[in-house]
Amino acid sequence: MTIPVIETERLTLRRPRIEDFDAYAAVFASDRSRFMDGPKPRREAWDEFASDCAAWVLRGYGIWSVETKDYGALAGWAGIIHPERYHEPELGWFLVEEYEGQGYAFEAAKAARQYARQNFGLNCPVSFISTGNHRSIRLAERLGATVEETRGSPDDRFFVYRHPASEAAQ
C-alpha cells in the first residue's frame, strides 16, 4: 500500500517509519500522554503504534508522521485514527514536546482533515478530547469543530468534537 505524502507550507506528512517509534514511545511514557490513556510502558506504546500503522492497510487511511521541512525533524503525528473500539473515524494529533505552541498541530491536522475529506470521503470526522486537555480543545475549536456531546465515565470524561463539513469556514 502506498501511503500518500502531504506537503504544507512548513511540514511534510509522511508514512510512519520504525525510526519514529522511539519518539512515539517517549511521548506515551511521559505525563503528556495522560489525555491519551497514558502514560504507557514501551510495549503498550508499540501496540498503539503498530495499530496506527496497520490502519493504512486495514482501513485505507491512518496517521502520518509529521516532519518539519526546515530540518526534517519529527514533530509528531496527525491523521485519522479508527481502532476497532471507536464507532467512527477520529481526526487526531499529537506532537513531541519541543514542537508544541508553534502552530504545527493546527497545520498538520487541517491538512490531514482536508486530505481525508477529498480522498477518503470522511466529511465530518470527530475528535475525542479529554475534558482536561485544554490545548487540544482550543485547537479543535480553531479548526472549526464544535462539541457534539460529552461521553465517558465520571473519572474519564471526554468531549466529542464534530468537524465542519467544509473548509470554507476556516
Image (cartoon, rainbow, N blue to C red):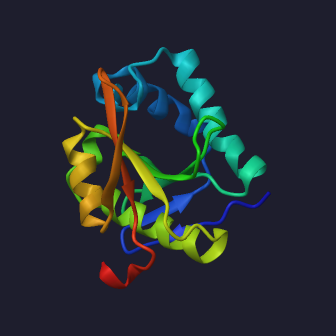
- Left or right: 74 with respect to 121? left
- Left or right: 18 with respect to 134? right
Q: Position of residue 99 (x, y in %)?
A: 28, 48
**Residue 29 appears in view:** yes
Between residues 96 and 87, which one lies in front from this camera angle? 87
- Left or right: 86 with respect to 108? right
User: How many discs mark residues in the rendered view?
Assistant: 0
- Residue lying at 38% horizontally and 19% vertically, measured from the top left: 39
Q: On the image, which quarter does residue 10 sit in?
A: bottom left
Q: State the quadrant of the C terminus.
A: bottom left
- Residue lying at 20% horizontally and 52% vertically, measured from the top left: 101
**Residue 69 appears in view:** no
Q: On the image, which quarter does residue 120 sit in?
A: bottom right
Q: Position of residue 17 (x, y in %)?
A: 62, 43
Q: State the quadrant of the N terminus.
A: bottom right
Q: Position of residue 79 (x, y in %)?
A: 51, 55
- Residue lying at 22% horizontally and 35% vertically, measured from the top left: 132
Q: On the image, which quarter does residue 61 sit in?
A: bottom right
Q: Position of residue 71 (x, y in %)?
A: 38, 57
- Residue lying at 25% horizontally and 50% vertically, measured from the top left: 137
- Left or right: 8 with respect to 55? left
Between residues 77 and 89, which one lies in front from this camera angle? 89
Above or below, comparing residue 109 to residue 123 in the picture = above
Residue that extends furthest to the bottom in the rendered view of this protein: 168
Between residues 60 and 154, which one lies in front from this camera angle? 154
Above or below, comparing residue 164 to residue 23 in the picture = below
Residue that extends furthest to the right in the rendered view of this protein: 1
